[in-house]
Amino acid sequence: MIDDKKLKEVESRVKQYLKEGVITTKGKKEFVDFFLKNARDSLESAKVLYDLSVDKEKQGVMGLTDFNGLLWVVNASYYSMFYMARALLESEGIKIRSDLSIHARTFDALVYFFYLNGRLQKRIIEYLAEAEEESADLLGMQKANELIKEYFFEKDKRSSFTYDTSAVMIKTKAKTSVDRATKFNAEIGKIIKT
């Protein structure tokens, strides 16, 4: 997923960001706890949403029939990783001007300051890239599914088959997202503590 060409592009962009002041490296370490809390809250939200989405008994206790928060599991998982990456950057005094493309700039800064120098393994960086991509893909899929569902509302059998299939896929992606975010956050947390 992250080949040499992409790494060179990241390196070039970050050098330009540094030159322009979009990314600075001598900032105060003032928001580490804020980003750590957001990362923890997002991951806990993802886990709760996943459990509630797959456990009919919990749904019944809460008065929610057929609750499905799997799309938001993927999003909350990604955001937990994003916030953890921001916490790591912040712990090193690395600041990112957030007026444009904060997610892409955070990814680039993480690669530049932590992967290229060997402090993070390639797989950890790929977790964040995959989570961001899946989150965007599933949001688009949800919108498409809603349009299709409205259009084919009369054809219950066909739509039922279609949405049961995508529900299984989304459930699998949601579980993967929670697991990936848990691993990512644990690894980044170790670096922040050192």
Image (spheres, rainbow, N blue to C red):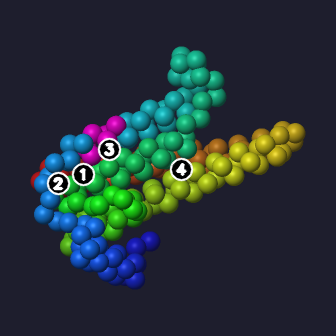
Q: Nearer the viewer, mark 3 or mark 4?
A: 3
- Residue 13 position (above or below residue 128): below
Q: Nearer the viewer, residue 43 or 92?
A: 92
Q: Look at mark 1 in the image and give the residue it sits on.
A: 87
Quarter of the view holding residue 125: bottom left
Mark pair 2, 1: CA separation: 6 Å
Query: Residue flagged by tag 4: what amino acid is it?
Result: Lys
Mark pair 2, 4: CA separation: 30 Å
For residue 20, say whether it is visible: yes
Query: Residue flagged by tag 3: what amino acid is it?
Result: Ala
- Residue 100 position (above or below residue 54): below
- Side of 55 where 182 appears, left or right: left
Q: Look at mark 3 in the image and give the residue it sits on.
A: 39
Q: Look at mark 2 in the image and give the residue it sits on.
A: 91
Quadrant location of the N terminus in the rendered image: bottom left
Q: Look at mark 4 in the image and give the residue it sits on.
A: 173
Mark pair 2, 3: CA separation: 14 Å
Q: Are marks 2 and 3 in contact (CB under 8 Å)?
A: no
Label 2, secondary structure: give it: helix
Q: Are marks 1 and 3 in contact (CB under 8 Å)?
A: yes
Residue 67 image position (x, y, % from top left):
60, 30
User: Is residue 155 within the magenta segment?
Assistant: no
Residue 60 image position (x, y, % from top left):
58, 19
Quadrant location of the C terminus in the rendered image: bottom left
User: Is residue 39 within the magenta segment?
Assistant: yes
Q: Residues within 10 Å of mark 4 (few under 14, many from 20)?
A: many
Q: Residue at x 59, y 47 (%)?
A: 170
Q: Earlier in the sequence, mark 1 or mark 3?
A: 3
- Which secondary structure class fits the magenta region best? helix
- Side of 156 where 95 appears, left or right: left
Mark pair 3, 4: CA separation: 19 Å
Q: Which residues are magenta?
A: 35-41
